[in-house]
Image: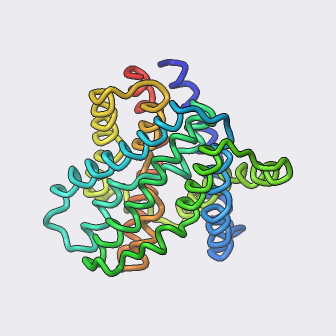
Amino acid sequence: MLHNFLIVLQQVIVLFLLILIGFFCGKRRIFSAETIRSLDFLVVNMALPCTIVRAFQMEHTAEMTRNLLLCIGFAALLQTLFLVASMPFAKNMPRDERAVYVLSSTLTNCSFMGFPLQSAVLGSLGILYGSGYVFSMNLCTFTVGYYLFTGDRRSISPKQIITRPAIFGTLLGLVLFVMDMSLPYTVSTVVDHIANLSVPLPMFIIGYHLSHVNVKAALRNRMHWRFSLLRLIVLPIAAIALLYALGLRGTVLLSLAVSASCPTATSVTIIANRFSDKGELSAELGAMQTLLSLLTLPVMLAFASLFA
């Protein structure tokens, strides 16, 4: 337990320093809004899919395939649990505000922050299983996420879901994995180089957004504290306990615990900006949770290690 705690703590410090660089560049206007949009496009459409594909480039075994499918299934179960558990806390809010708080409890930053931690603690196998959580979360984002804001099922586009880079990367990686196909050396090398961008660039992006959020105002918002406590402590503990009760152990449990313990996903703010005027509210909440998660993530992973 102590070993995993120290590994996660070291990795969290690394992520914090990278976030600090992004924060500094945002404050000094070294990064512009256009720069961040370009970096975000690069990360979402290239770096993260390459990270997923690289994780699948390993010797295929029946147990690994079984565990990956388990991760996808249990990720969907956890996201359903998070959704249902958070709704009573937001029942008296206006629809758009309720959507922000409920989604912030349901969707986690399991790619931007999850992958680096899974890689540090569990290696490539952690990212492989973490990809299952990302796959399920993307499905939840573009179905439940859209519906909570619009109340209209027509806003859900199957074509948009299938063509999402993270979904496509997972499907491609899975095909290569099941068929025991390795990428050619040249292609594999390019994929490796692009995938290596998936740690620093997301942290720069997070740091930039933190530099443009009124953190003091966020810290004074009681509702932010309520849902941050729910997202970062209550729901992760409930998830770990449930997974343990259902018989999960080892790498599968730890990988899911990492994904379930991360702060709210940046996609919540993107959806909030698209369908409502609550983008600033979502950004404040996301910034606050990201800062608090630097303290809670090592503790949650140490707790999960007791049961793994």
Name the residue nearer the viewer: 162 or 222: 162
Residue 189 showing in the rendered view? yes
Q: Quadrant of residue 8?
A: top right
- Residue projecting furthest to the front: 179
Residue 236 lies, in percent from the top left, at 34, 39
Vertical placement of 215 versus 131: above or below? below
Quadrant assignment for the C terminus: top left
In the image, taking residue 85 as reference, residue 58 lies left or right, namely: right
178 sits to left or right of 256:
right
Task: Estimate the x, y position of residue 263 in percent, counting from the top left.
Answer: 43, 49
Q: Residue furthest right?
A: 186
- When asked about the image quadrant of residue 248, the answer is top left
Q: Nearer the viewer, residue 172 or 255?
A: 172
Is 133 situated left or right of 28 in this image? left
The residue located at (37%, 22%) in the rendering is 307
- Measured as percent of width and height from the top left, residue 120 is found at 61, 33
